[in-house]
Image (cartoon, rainbow, N blue to C red):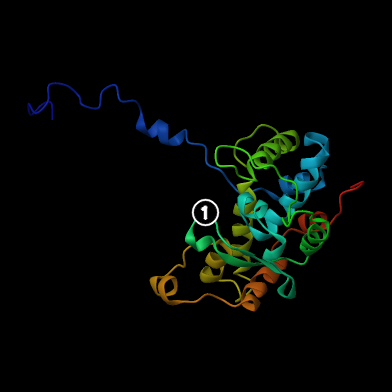
Amino acid sequence: MRKRGFVEGNPWEGQGNFVSAVKSVRLKRAYEAQELVRLLTADPRSAVGSRYGLVLFDLIRLGLLTGCRIGELCQLRVDDVIESHQAFRIPQGKTENARRIMPVHRAVWPIIQRRIASSIDGWLFSGLTPAGPDGKRSWIVVKRYTTFRQAVLGQSGAVDFHSFRRSFATYLERASTHSMAVNSSVIAELMGHVKPTLALAVYSSGLVPAQLRAAIDALDHVIEPEVIRHIGREIGGS
């Protein structure tokens, strides 16, 4: 452009290195199995105290085996639990598609039962203090989780609580090679995402709980034995 006389100088000069800027973006990832074992075997109370430590102990297990966002879990009410199906409903979320029925894996269903029995205010996770600019019940929990994660795994910014959701999605994709109960439509519904085709997104009324349950059960094919072994353990002295 400069040679042809359209501009007097290089219009991109001084604008920085765009390639380097893209490469510098730190991408988040799913947890590796050994990281999950370290998180599942640690006692969060040692890092954040009893009040939020007991909450985190349960949340990391539910996050891993439901793929729910931390805000969705903290907003659950006892009335959202469908005990007859061992599931709960997400009445609202980040998007319209976030509304869904979530079957609970048998390894973490006892957490739901215990939380129902101990609720004193109608919330599944009782006693959380709304905070932050939006008054979210998960605001303080997110900060406490960061403290706990860094105490266990170090300062790496490659993972966060949302990485449990990434791990859940990874397990579902792997399970799709073992069971016909898991496919892209099922994964989208369990994740609270838009369906993969226009026809399903516009016209389908969704899957029934039994179909979603079959997909959750298929996770048994792919979750590492050392991970599933520690998911079901109870926290001592609670």
Task: Name the spot of residue 156 as percent of width and height, x first.
Answer: 63, 34
Q: Is residue 231 left or right of residue 164?
A: right
Q: Secondary structure at mark 1?
A: loop
Q: Nearer the viewer, residue 195 or 156?
A: 195
Q: Amino acid at mark 1?
A: Lys
Q: Nearer the viewer, residue 191 or 95?
A: 95
Front residue of this view, candidates 11 and 238: 238
218 on left or right of 195 = right
Q: Give the residue displayed 38% in from the left and 34% down from the top.
A: 19
- Residue 97 position in % (x across, y down): 50, 63
Q: Position of residue 141 (x, y in %)?
A: 68, 42
Residue at 82 percent across and 54 percent down: it is 230
Residue at 68 percent of width and 70 percent of height: 218
| Count of marks overlaid on the render | 1
Quarter of the N terminus within the rendering: top left
Q: Which residue is mark 1?
A: 94
Quadrant of the rendered structure where residue 143 is?
Answer: top right
Looking at the image, the residue that sits furthest to the front is 121
Q: Using a 10 Å C-alpha cutoff, classify the residue at mark 1 as few (fewer than 14 neighbours), some (14 to 19) or many (20 or more).
A: few
Placement of 33 over or under 9, stated as above or below: below
Outermost left residue: 5
Q: Is residue 16 left or right of residue 224?
A: left
Expressed as whole percent of the image width and height from the top left, the position of residue 227 reads 77, 55
